[in-house]
Image (tube, rainbow, N blue to C red):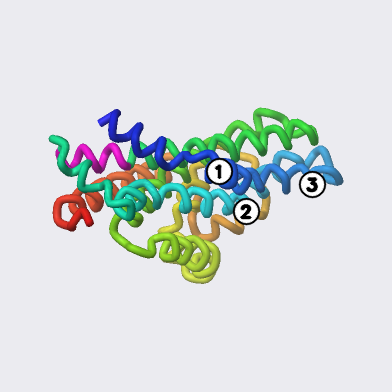
């Protein structure tokens, strides 16, 4: 299992791709630094929460681009059948793929969060206010990997479909349709963050919308998404042609 996961992880983490996606994940840090130059020191904690909650959507795109490639590149390159020939069960391959995709997304998440920390320190944000931000990025990384790794295997134009989900469903429709807000990976991770952080601004509450903050509920939902991703991917690996 570790061998497959490491192989898939290394294949995804090409230098050129990684640097570009890390830069995209770091956009919240840049915005925080610019916004904090003229901000009131007493409002920096809520400013941090608002910016990572709203501008942090850039991480969603970065996670999508990276994680859909987990098995898609193997399939497009014609190397996936060689993995099938090894004496590994389909469930083992599914777990390994999700581990690789999750690890890759978490790498971007750590980079994005560290960018906000560097920017926050530069403008005077208290470190304790920024530590919960890692929960937001990490939770979103797990959720997006659980969704996009199976998508990359199942759908030929998975990047376009994933962009449709992030841009149309999460960014637009979730703001006007209450039910769709519950299906937003970003909002699921955000409800955990908002509960842990405690101090959030109006921007964070607007992004949450009808979704209430809650550590237990949000964590349970992320676990549910992970399990669903595993089941879907395992069934797909068992019943779909490797080519």
| Disc assigned to residue 74 | none
Q: Nearer the viewer, residue 184 or 7?
A: 7
Residue 29: image location, x then y, percent: 69, 42
Gap between marks 1 and 2 measured at Cα: 26 Å
Left or right placement of residue 132 versus residue 64 in this view? right
Q: State which region is magenta.
A: 89-97
Is tag 1's residue or tag 3's residue first in the polypeptide sequence?
1
Question: The N terminus is located in which quarter?
Answer: top left
Distance between mark 1 and mark 3 Cα atoms: 27 Å
The residue to which callout 2 is attached is 54
Crowdedness near tag 2: few (<14), some (14–19) or many (≥20) residues, C-alpha within 10 Å: some
Q: Which mark is residue 34?
A: 3
For mark 3, give the secondary structure. Answer: helix
The residue that disc 1 covers is 16
Sequence order check, earlier mark of 2 and 3: 3
Please identify the quadrant where the C terminus is shown.
Answer: bottom left
Q: Are marks 1 and 3 in contact (CB under 8 Å)?
A: no
The secondary structure that dominates the magenta segment is helix
Q: Quadrant of residue 220?
A: top left
Determine the secondary structure under disc 1. helix
Element assignment for label 2: helix
For residue 28, side relative to residue 3 (left or right): right
Q: Position of residue 20 (x, y in %)?
A: 59, 46
Left or right: 224, with 15 as reference point: left
Above/below status of 200 relative to 107? below
């Amino acid at each position: 299992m570790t061998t497959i996961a490491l192989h898939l992880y290394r294949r995804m983490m090409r230098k050129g791709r990684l640097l570009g996606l890390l830069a995209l994940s770091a956009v919240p840090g840049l915005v925080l630094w610019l916004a904090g130059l003229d901000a009131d020191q007493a409002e920096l904690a809520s400013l941090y929460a608002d910016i990572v909650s709203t501008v942090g959507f850039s991480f969603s795109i970065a996670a999508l681009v990276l994680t859909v490639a987990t098995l898609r590149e193997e399939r497009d390159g014609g190397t996936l059948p060689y993995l099938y020939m090894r004496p590994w069960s389909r469930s083992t391959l599914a777990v390994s793929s999700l581990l690789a995709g999750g690890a890759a997304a978490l790498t971007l998440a750590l980079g994005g969060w560290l960018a906000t920390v560097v920017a926050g320190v530069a403008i005077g944000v208290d470190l304790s206010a920024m530590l919960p931000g890692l929960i937001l990025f990490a939770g979103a990384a797990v959720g997006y990997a659980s969704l996009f790794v199976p998508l990359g295997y199942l759908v030929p134009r998975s990047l376009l479909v994933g962009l449709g989900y992030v841009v149309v469903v999460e960014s637009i429709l979730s703001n006007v349709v209450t039910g769709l807000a519950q299906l937003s990976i970003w909002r699921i991770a955000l409800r955990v963050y908002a509960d842990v952080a405690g101090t959030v601004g109006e921007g964070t509450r607007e992004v949450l919308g009808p979704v209430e903050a809650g550590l237990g509920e949000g964590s349970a939902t992320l676990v549910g998404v992970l399990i669903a991703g595993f089941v879907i991917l395992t069934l797909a690996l068992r019943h779909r042609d490797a080519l």
